[in-house]
Amino acid sequence: MVGLGSTAKKLQTVADQAEKVYKRMNKLRDEVEETQQTVDETQERVGTIEEELDEQRAVLDAIAEEHDIDVDAVAAEVHINEAEGDGTAAASDDEAAGGN
């Protein structure tokens, strides 16, 4: 019967480890839920920002059309200047917009 004390001690150790794992799992579950909530909130914000950007783009396109400005050409020139590291994108924008 000496082995029963050793077995009880081993069982207690296993039970303690199981409790630690259970606590850790619950903590991870909470963290995953928080992360999912953050992802959902971020997705909502991104959607809102995309809608606002679309609206702003429509306004910009309307203004550009009214002033005979080719928005795509201006954007392309800016991208080219940025890629070349020119640093004169702002000056090029003014020129493309008719010098205003």
Image (spheres, rainbow, N blue to C red):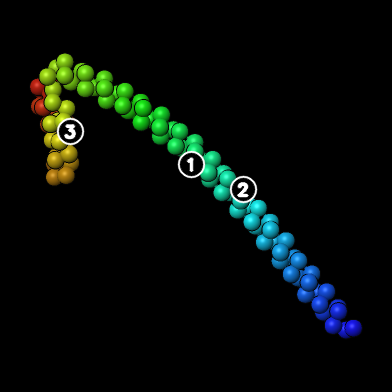
Instruction: Name the residue type under label 2.
Output: Asp
Q: Secondary structure at mark 2?
A: helix
Asked where in the image residue 62 lies, by quadrant, the reply is top left
Question: Any mark on residue 30, and which?
Answer: 2
In the image, what residue occupies the spot 16% across and 44% down?
A: 83
Residue indicated by mark 1 = 39
Regarding residue 88, the answer to whether it shows in the image is no
Q: Position of residue 94 (x, y in %)?
A: 13, 26
Q: In the shown orientation, is residue 56 left or right of residue 89?
A: right
Identify whether 11 is placed above or below 25: below
Q: Position of residue 20 (x, y in %)?
A: 70, 61
In the image, what residue occupies the spot 17% across and 33% down?
A: 75
Instruction: Name the residue type under label 1.
Output: Val
Q: Secondary structure at mark 1?
A: helix
Q: CA distance from mark 3 to mark 2?
A: 45 Å
For marks 3 and 2, give the one nearer the viewer: 2
Residue indicated by mark 3 = 75
Q: Residue furthest right?
A: 1
In the image, what residue occupies the spot 17% across and 27% down?
A: 71
Q: CA distance from mark 2 to mark 1?
A: 14 Å
Task: Specify few, some or many for label 2: CA neighbours under 10 Å numbering under 14, 14-19, or 20 or more.
Answer: few
Regarding residue 45, the answer to whether it shows in the image is yes
